[in-house]
Amino acid sequence: MNENTRPAYILGGNRIPFARSNAQYAKASNQDMLTTVIDGIATSHSLQGERLGEVAAGAVLKHARDINLTREAVLGTKLAPETPAYDIGQACGTGLEAAILAANKIALGQTESAIAGGADTTSDAPISLNDDLREILLEANAARSTTARIKVLAKVRPGQIVPDFPRNAEPRTGLSMGEHTAIMAREWGLTREEQDELAAASHQNLAAAYDRGFMDDLVSPYLGLERDGNLRPDATVESLAKLKPVFGGEGGTMTAGNSTPLSDGASAVLLGTEEWAAGHGIEPLARFVDAEVAAVDYVGKKEGLLMAPAYAVPRMLERNGLTLQDFDLYEIHEAFAAQVLSTLKAWDDPVFCKQRLGLDAPLGEIDRAKLNVNGGSLGVGHPFAATGGRIVASLAKALAERGEGRGLISICAASGQGVVAILER
Amino acid sequence: MPEDLYSQVINSRIGGFVAGNVGLPQPVELDRYEPGGPVIDGEVLLGAAPGGRLSGPVARALAGAGAVVKTELNGEVRVAAGEAGLDAGVWNPEGGAEARFKALVLDATGISDSTDLRELWKFFHPTIRQVERSGRIVVLGTAPGACGSPRQATAQRALEGFTRAVGKEVRKGASSQLVYVDHGAEDAIDSTLRFLLSPRSAYVSGQVVRIAEPVAEIPRFDPERPLQGKVALVTGASRGIGAAIADVLSRDGAHVVGLDVPSLEEDLKEVVGQIGGSALAADITEDEAPARIADHLASEHEGVDIVVHNAGVTRDKTLGRMDAERWDLLMDINLSAQERIDDGLLERDLIRANGRLIGVSSISGIAGNAGQTNYSTSKAGVIGRVESMAPIVGKAGVTINAVAPGFIETAMTKAMPVPTREAGRRMNSMLQGGLPLDVAEAIAWFAGPGSAGVNGNVVRVCGQSLIGA
């Protein structure tokens, strides 16, 4: 094993505009979309026929037949068919985790280049069979004679011929992510207004980024969309205030406007060593410095389901000798405005920092002017596995635009996990 | 459910309907202490006026009591909660109208001017209607006499009007108190906070308690049995409030020496027998009584830790019809005998370090009562004794305090005529009479080793009776 590490760099990124569920991408499959964005990187960086070190990607809502989703996608691109690939899964952390894995192999000297990404569609969702029916069919398949088969099939009851749609609920609590986040919002005393403010800023910053051309080399049109389908450039706190609450019951503060919509889309990020980049005429955007993952006990200890990043960031900061304020840009995935705000309040709370993080003093506030400056998930939309790649590419380019700086990425994920990372230029 | 007939009736469906429509008082069942129960059975909302000095000590006291606390997200209270190790939840005054609290605690020591009194409104206006049944409201401040300026003294004195009015406004058996904490007494507030926030103070409301620098170092002790290893003398222990005092002190771990007149020795023996205490039959009006009592305590227990002067009689008569015997006997039993007994014990140095002298006064001694000129005089004398002796015994590491019971359900009050009795029962914020247990719990609070900062206090156990103040 190589004892020396070397830095891994973000070299570029490509994504398709994200669409709302059952809209423009209603018929697009994960494989279609993933193939498109990987191919997009191959085209824009002149990698036709190149064998890359590897491609790592995933999808959260995955068809059973997509067992080799990423490899099958790679085989559909202009990259050399000798390019290896694998699928990973960590709910909404998939995209960033894929980037971490790719960067780590580069750092360890096992590869020179990689693509990391993710895709998700909630329109073309996998539907499975009712479990009882499935067991009967398997039994029938294993039966040795026709009569035996018929006997087994006779066990089928009408109530079993019901498809099993994927449910948006944590298996161990039975609550949806929105309901879990509503608990967090109540515990942290969040107001409707501050959540809507965050949501409005998300749309406005995204529109501004498109208008000034920031997205030009990051987003490629697909199936009739040039900009993200969820974007409302004229979203304001007043317009968002008109929406009815959807989580949190009577007096709930969470609406469709300050929660991410179900979305379809894909993204990919190109990584490599300095030498490999130079050899291909590519200017690196930012260095992949470090990453951390945390998980919380949202079942037994009833920690907030989406609070894991609040635990991951302090660990990473300590390891790197940084404070929470040592960043020029912050990218916090806006699963719900309430999730972002709960996390920020937790970092500034003496009780949380002492009781849960074991710190002597709170981490403190961040400068809100540095948060999600080119738009966030509330404006863009959130195809689960595609968000990580979107954020990595966008932050890397933003740092390059500044010339120098350090950025923090924080992404929460279902089943109580969180993935965070530091990029630097 | 309070056991009197009116309470039983008014809390039935029809009774409740009538009461609600006609505006009759509806007393609720007060929470009372059960051994092993939590100190506070519900959430505590903790706040502070900016610039206060008690956030830290109060947070630590609440943490020690195992309380579940909420605070606002920013400010010195939040920092204090973090440092005290309190896993405090977040309270947002703008949201959460459904939140319910068992206790509202405000550190008002930061109020230094009448314009700062707005902090009272700021903290209590959004929360006062969210107090649970048998809830607790406690405001902490600095005694006017210990303030640094007339402005500050004015504002701190104003707190008393607030807490008394709150006590009369809140419904459903909730109580309201003011606690003045002297400089240097910040670490001596635990026992008082625990008492006032717990079900033990069920029948105490509208009171002002002053905590001074402790007269002796507060030792470590088991909060479940704080009087372990202590010896307590309780006079008049054969029945009524005296028996309840013996019971509670024993429950808290003390060995109780019960005292009563020889004619009640059988009842006395039964009371102390049940609690594993001992009996001393004596007539406290006799000349030799102080010496006999001192001898007994010296030989049997090498001294005494707690002395509770509960023995007392009534000899009601209007003054013009009161003969000398009614006056003299009552004054001796209710006041002079206590002075002699205490003198005897203090002279022979029999009251141990961190000792406790506790008297039983009465609202009659505070407000007076027709037909009780002798009784009221003696009970006001008990107050005078507490106030005058506090600095003196304090130097010897001993505290002296008194409870002043209001309408307590005993054999004595059962014998009152119905109209007078009902009036007495209802004319208080709790809308019911108290129990002998309630008086005993307040005495146990005075007696605890943690109360070394509580000296010279007279605390009414009257459910915030409308009589007197």
Image: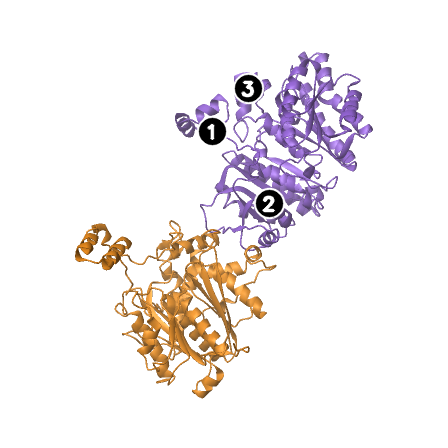
Chain colours: A orange, B purple
In the image, are marks 1 and 3 on the same chain?
yes
Name the amino acid type tagged 2: Leu
Disc 2 element: helix
Left or right: B85, with B336 as reference point:
left
Mark 2 Cα within 10 Å, few/some/many (few <14, many 20+)?
A: many
Name the amino acid type tagged 1: Gln
Name the amino acid type tagged 3: Thr
Circle 3 marks a residue in which chain?
B
Residue at image coords 57%, 29%: B466
Q: On the image, numbered disc 1 is attached to which residue?
A: B26
Give the x, y percent position of residue A398. 46, 76
Q: Is residue B340 visible?
A: no
Q: Is residue A6 visible?
A: yes
Q: Is A246 above or below relative to A267?
A: above
Disc 3 element: helix
Q: Is B211 above or below relative to B341?
A: below
Left or right: A138, with A391 as reference point:
left
Give the x, y percent position of residue B422. 52, 21
Q: On the image, numbered disc 2 is attached to which residue?
A: B62
Q: On the image, numbered disc 3 is attached to which residue?
A: B420
In front: B273, or B261?
A: B273
